[in-house]
């Protein structure tokens, strides 16, 4: 979750500077991106995370894996001559 917050935070900083320092077309574009980043971050933290926790809790457990020996040749290999 910290990666989501850090990524969206740095992106918001760049977009805020673009909003205040850019022209009128850039302001509308930056505002749309800011709204999208805020909504996406909210969704990742407060909606997707609880759904993932419930999903993992209710998922069937996989049986433990058995260790296998390396595959062997189906017949004896001939000795190499020098």
Image (tube, rainbow, N blue to C red):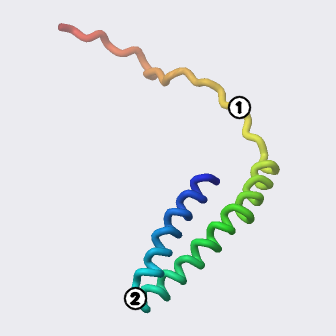
Q: Which label belongs to residue 64?
A: 1
Q: Quadrant of the C terminus?
A: top left
Rendering coords of residue 11 (x, y %): 50, 67
Q: Pick out the residue farthest to the left.
A: 82
Rendering coords of residue 73 (x, y %): 43, 21
Q: Can you tell which quarter of the image residue 54 is in? A: bottom right
Q: Can you tell which quarter of the image residue 65 is in? A: top right
User: First in sequence: mark 2 or mark 1?
Assistant: 2
Q: Residue at x 42, y 90 (%)?
A: 25
Q: Which label belongs to residue 6?
A: none
> Is 42 or 50 nearer to us in this picture?
42
State whether residue 17 is above or below residue 70. Answer: below
SS under mark 2: loop
Q: Residue at x 64, y 54 (%)?
A: 1
Q: Which residue is mark 2?
A: 23
State whether residue 27 is above or below residue 70. Answer: below
Rendering coords of residue 12 (x, y %): 53, 69
């Amino acid at each position: 979750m910290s990666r989501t917050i850090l990524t969206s935070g740095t992106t918001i900083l760049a977009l805020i500077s673009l909003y205040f320092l850019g022209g009128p077309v850039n302001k509308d574009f930056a505002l749309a991106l800011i709204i999208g980043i805020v909504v996406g971050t909210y969704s990742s933290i407060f909606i997707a995370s609880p759904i993932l926790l419930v999903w993992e809790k209710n998922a069937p457990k996989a049986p433990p894996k058995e260790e296998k020996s390396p595959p062997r040749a189906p017949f004896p290999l001939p000795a190499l001559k020098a």
